[in-house]
Amino acid sequence: MAAPNIKIPVMLIHNKDDNQIPVENSYLLENALQKNPQNQFYYFQFKKETHGEFPDDFVLRVKEFLK
């Protein structure tokens, strides 16, 4: 997996109740990113939303990440 070699900031976003993509996929990517201590990544998991739904503070989180 190439994730440990990524050298740019990564924002992971996943809905816990996603009915199309298992949340375990984001756990695998998160674990791979953690293998390189120089990686900068931000993981947000939403609890109530399903695939394609976002909480009210979603846009604020993305804007903060992009600063």
Image: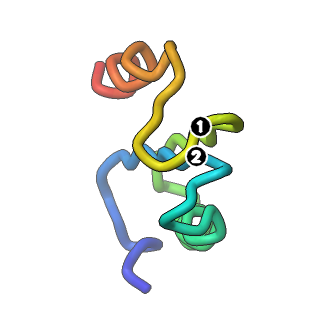
Residue 3 coordinates in the image, percent (x, y) = 42, 72
Residue highlighted by disc 2? 15
Which quadrant is the N terminus positioned in?
bottom left
The quadrant where residue 59 appears: top left
Q: Are marks 1 and 2 in contact (CB under 8 Å)?
A: yes
Residue 23 coordinates in the image, percent (x, y) = 62, 62
Q: Nearer the viewer, residue 66 or 58?
A: 58
Tell me the element at label 1.
loop
Tell me the element at label 2.
strand
| Kind of residue at badge 1 | Glu
Residue 61 coordinates in the image, percent (x, y) = 45, 21
- Residue depth check, mark 1 versus mark 2: number of the one nearer the observer: 1
* Pointer 2 local density, CA inside 10 Å: few below 14, some 14–19, many at least 20: many
* Pointer 1 local density, CA inside 10 Å: few below 14, some 14–19, many at least 20: some
N-terminal of the pair, mark 1 or mark 2, is: 2
- Mark 1–mark 2 Cα distance, whole angstroms, equals 6 Å
> Can residue 60 be seen in the rendering of this structure?
yes
Q: Residue at x 56, y 60 (%)?
A: 19
> Tell me, what colour scheme is on the image?
rainbow
Residue highlighted by disc 1? 49
Vertical side of 60 occupied by 15: above or below:
below
Q: Residue at x 33, y 18 (%)?
A: 63
Q: Nearer the viewer, residue 61 or 65?
A: 61
The quadrant where residue 5 appears: bottom left
| Outermost residue toward the right in this view | 47
Q: Residue at x 40, y 43 (%)?
A: 52
Q: Nearer the viewer, residue 29 or 53?
A: 53
Q: Is residue 24 left or right of residue 42?
A: right
